[in-house]
Image (cartoon, grey):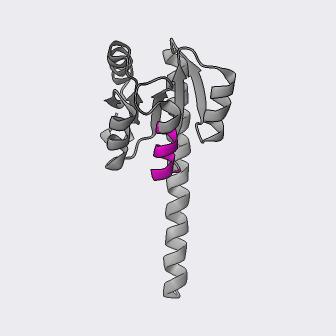
């Protein structure tokens, strides 16, 4: 698989064993994975990089998943984010979706379901970037009078 075609995924979870295991499983399926063990380090990661998908744990010390979601969306409104929870409540998942999460998965996560979600997020992101590029080209053509 060409490097530019690899989906870029940011995994954020304070449980390091879970994070390492999930990262290895996704990398073995050809994904480009970055990990963060806190909301703060996730925010630092999105500063200089855009991801096709961010998988964000709900329960973390410091910035929890909801606070991290809000802050990432403030910086990158188009970011595709899936929330993960070991003890997720319906109310919390509804709040996360209202704040812009595209999905909510329970731990332990089903790797095939997650791979499907990553594929959907990458396609959605590619379509959005393509649409944005077309709009920019049309704007340039219109302003130049071509």
Quadrant in which the N terminus is drawn? top left
Report the residue at 57% width, 14% height from top.
87
Q: Quadrant of residue 16?
A: top left
**Residue 94 position within the rendered picture, expressed as x and y whole percent measured from the top left:** 68, 31
Observer-nearest of 89 and 105:
89
Residue 70: x %, y % from top left = 52, 43
Q: Is residue 27 left or right of residue 95?
A: left
Magenta span includes 75: yes
- Residue lying furthest bottom in this view? 145
Q: Nearer the viewer, residue 140 or 70?
A: 70
Q: Which residues are magenta?
A: 68-77
Question: Residue 34 occupies which quadrant of the picture?
Answer: top left
Q: In the image, what residue occupies the spot 57% across and 21% down?
A: 105
Question: x, y (%) of residue 102?
Answer: 60, 36
Q: Is residue 95 magenta?
A: no
Q: Is residue 44 above or below residue 139?
A: above
Taking the view exactly as shown, the residue that stands out farthest to the front is 62
Q: Is residue 18 left or right of residue 59?
A: left
Residue 76 visible in rendering: no
């Amino acid at each position: 698989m060409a490097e530019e075609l690899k989906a870029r995924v940011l995994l954020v979870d304070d449980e390091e064993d879970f994070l390492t295991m999930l990262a290895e499983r996704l990398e073995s399926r050809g994904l480009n994975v970055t990990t963060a063990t806190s909301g703060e380090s996730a925010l630092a990661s999105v500063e200089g990089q855009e991801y096709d998908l961010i998988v964000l744990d709900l329960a973390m010390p410091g910035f929890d998943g909801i606070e991290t979601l809000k802050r990432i969306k403030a910086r990158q409104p188009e970011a595709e984010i899936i929330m993960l929870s070991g003890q997720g409540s319906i109310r919390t998942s509804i709040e996360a979706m209202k704040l812009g999460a595209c999905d909510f998965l329970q731990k332990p996560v089903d790797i095939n379901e997650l791979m499907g979600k990553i594929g959907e997020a990458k396609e959605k992101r590619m379509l959005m970037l393509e649409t944005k590029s077309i709009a920019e080209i049309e704007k340039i053509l219109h302003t130049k009078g071509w």
